[in-house]
Amino acid sequence: MNPSTSRKKKKKATYYDDHNFINTIFSWSLQDIFNEDLYTNKVDYIDLYFKSIEQYFKSFVYPLLEETRAQICSSMEILSSLPYAEVLSLEKKLSHSCGRNHYVVKTDTWKNSSSGYGKELYKTLSGDVFILTDFKPESVNDLTRSGKMWSFVLSAGVLHDTELISTFKVTASKDIDIDETGQKSLFIIFLTNITPNRWIWNALHMGGDSKLVERILCPTDV
């Protein structure tokens, strides 16, 4: 028997193995994002000592969500000055990963590409959060206009990126009607990158069992 065929293949982890971090962000409404008290009653004082590793990790969950909310909110307050591009094509990408809505986006040249980044031009990265719309909004209030389509989308991998054209995979916060949007001009606006937030979130949910960590966090009398 061939060892390579008898060995059980380990399932490759995907970008979306994130313990519902992206689902939580995608569940926020505009009101939630601009609500500074969204997690006020859930952010507790973080003590110096803990009864368990689980208690230690959980104590940072809501502060991280609040930090992420504030990060997205801060970007949306300056929506008109953020990097944006016109969408050249939007294609549905079949995927069974967590039931999310996957697409491939191709854009033309990014405008406002150096906004907030000094002389460094904006380049698409995995973990970038965008707003995809069928118009170019100047403020958040524009997103509430009746009859306008918009959705949060998250970059899940860059396929091709030059100064003229960018092609990358995204997952959207809701299903996008390709047939309907195909008749309209689409725009995509960069908000922020949440990759570091996701790394921290995953670390908080990894289920620590280290005796050393437990001894440091949960000291007992000798």
Image (cartoon, helix red, strand yellow):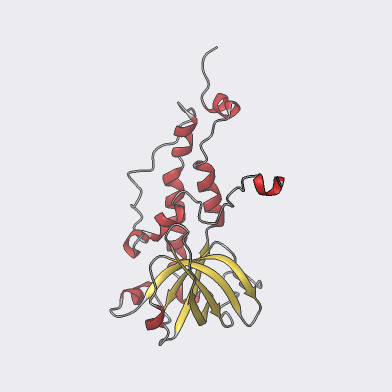
In the rendered view, tell whether residue 112 sits above or below residue 38.
below
In the rendered view, tell whether residue 1 sits above or below residue 177.
above
Percent of width and height locating residue 33: 37, 60
Q: Is residue 123 visible?
A: no
Query: Residue sitting at 58 percent across and 75 percent down?
Result: 167
Percent of width and height locating residue 81: 50, 75
Q: Nearer the viewer, residue 65 or 73?
A: 65
Percent of width and height locating residue 17: 51, 52
Q: Nearer the viewer, residue 134 or 71?
A: 134
Query: Residue sitting at 55 percent across and 80 percent down?
Result: 107
Query: Residue sitting at 58 percent across and 26 percent down?
Result: 211
Q: Is residue 97 visible?
A: yes
Give the farthest residue toward the left: 146
Q: Nearer the viewer, residue 53 or 112?
A: 53
Where residue 182 sits, quadrant-wise, is bottom left
In the rendered view, tell whether residue 26 sits above or below residue 141.
above
Query: Residue sitting at 44 percent across and 33 percent down?
Result: 55
Q: Which quadrant is the C terminus positioned in? A: top right
